[in-house]
Amino acid sequence: MRLNKIFRVTILGLFVLSCAAAASMAQEAPTAKEPDPLVVLRQMCDYLKSLPQFSYHAEVADDQVYLGGKKLQYGIDMDTYVKRPDTVRVNAVGDLVNKEFFLNGATLTLYDKDKNVYATMEVPTDIEGALEKANKDFGVRVALTDLASPRLWDQVSSKIGHSLYVGMSNVRGIPCHHLAFDGKDVQIQVWVDAGKEPLPRKVVFTSKDQEGSPQWTAYLNEWKIDPHLQDALFTFTPPEGVRKIKFAQAKQPPAPAEEKGGKS
């Protein structure tokens, strides 16, 4: 009987010691540090910038707001091809769009297949300059073409006010870093491939300044980082019967009214 009592006391003592040791180890064990979302984003931007050419497919869901905040969602399939330093092509087909975009050196062309018209403009002979001129002068923006810009990091980081590392997430079976960035008018979420190639696998733009806060979501897949794209892919040849038109000038914001008491 006394032996059993001693045995129970011994077991209890070992249990207490083991619990204390486990607690001590838990306190001493370093916690895993979360990745810095800005560092992960910079790695993605730098990697894309390093690629001489690449292509990908994007499946897009585009929210359109109507009647006091109600939303409808439309789909778009986009195939994008980039060959540095001065060529980009985008084919976009969806519920509300059927267009092809060509940037070939100093010439930018937009072809509307449904309306059977196209327009061209002269642009600087680099991707960044061409996209900037098209947007500034004619309000032409083609979704995701900024991924081809060598200044992608500068463009994105300048709009970020707050950043958050959300955690690891699977995008169609691919482990990704889920990042969130908050700007003045838009919130951006990016899922970056956690493997050797930090490619964007999903992006979500939420427009905070628009009624209903519509979202624009794209899943990016079928990435090819060395596709050996032919020059002919970026050359637009007008089909028979297509009509050439001119780009409409972008509306410029009105000049600020001169304040009373200002300089004469």
Image: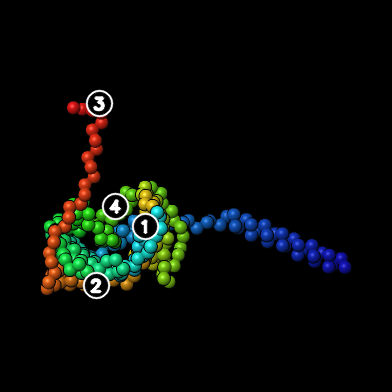
Tell me the residue at 57%/55% (across/down): 28
Tell me the residue at 17%/68% (across/down): 116
Of the image marks 4 and 1, the number of the one nearer the N terminus: 1
Residue denoted by label 3: 261
Residue denoted by label 2: 227
Q: At which x and y percent is residue 2?
A: 87, 65
* Marks 4/1: CA–CA distance: 30 Å
* Marks 4/3: CA–CA distance: 38 Å
Confirm or deny contact between disc 2 and disc 4 (CB under 8 A): no
Image position of 23 (left or right of 183): right
Confirm or deny contact between disc 1 and disc 2 (CB under 8 A): no
Q: Amino acid at mark 2?
A: Pro
Report which quarter residue 261 is drawn in.
top left
Q: Residue furthest right?
A: 1
Report which quarter residue 45 is drawn in.
bottom left
| Within-10-Å neighbours for mark 1: few <14, some 14–19, many 20+ | few
Q: Amino acid at mark 3?
A: Gly
Seen from the viewer's position, the closer of residues 101 and 252 is 252
